[in-house]
Image: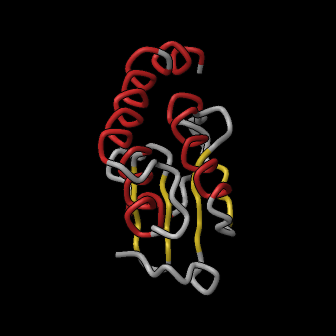
Amino acid sequence: MMDTTHEQTSVEFCGHWICPFATHVEFALHQRGIEHAVVDLPPAAVRGPDFELPEQFVAHSPRLEIPMVRVGQEFRVDSIPILEWLEDAMPEHPLLPFDEPSRALVRERMAWIDRHAFPAMVGVY
């Protein structure tokens, strides 16, 4: 579990504003008041052939896709797992409702957006 004293733990976000999945994660970091460094990494589809990925990103992102978050020495990849991890690790700053039926509804709606809205956006870049 993540150290909830995030003010003392360094947090780094790897992502890019053009990626809707990365913006999910950066929004959650901001909403929770988590200070974080930003490593601007464009999505794989728009990286030039000479673009060099940071060593740490290559080592911890199996598909070399954004977003990725490092909290202390822990790394997480993929927007939904990162968001779930933050929700569990930081209960003092929840973004999901407290009751399980409402949480399930939010998750269902997010999954719908990921399936139906984001693929069209991903095709743009």
Q: Nearer the viewer, residue 102 or 48?
A: 102
- The residue that appears at 41% across and 53% down in the rendered structure is 98
Q: Nearer the viewer, residue 93 or 89?
A: 93
- The residue that appears at 40% across and 73% down in the rendered structure is 74
Give coordinates of residue 37: x percent, y percent. 68, 66
Q: Nearer the viewer, residue 36 or 106?
A: 106
* Residue 6 in the figure: left or right of residue 86: right
Image quadrant where one finds the N terminus: bottom left
- The residue that appears at 61% across and 87% down in the rendered structure is 8
Give coordinates of residue 27: x percent, y percent. 63, 47
- The residue that appears at 50% across and 48% down in the rendered structure is 67
Height in image: 15 above or below 86? above
Give coordinates of residue 24: x percent, y percent. 56, 41
Q: Nearer the viewer, residue 32 or 81?
A: 32
Height in image: 1 above or below 118? below
Height in image: 69 above or below 113? below
Image quadrant where one finds the C terminus: top right
Height in image: 117 above or below 91? above
Kindly give the residue lying farthest to the bottom in the view shown. 8
Give coordinates of residue 79: x percent, y percent. 44, 45
Please say which color scheme the image uses.
Answer: secondary structure
* Residue 39 in the figure: left or right of residue 2: right
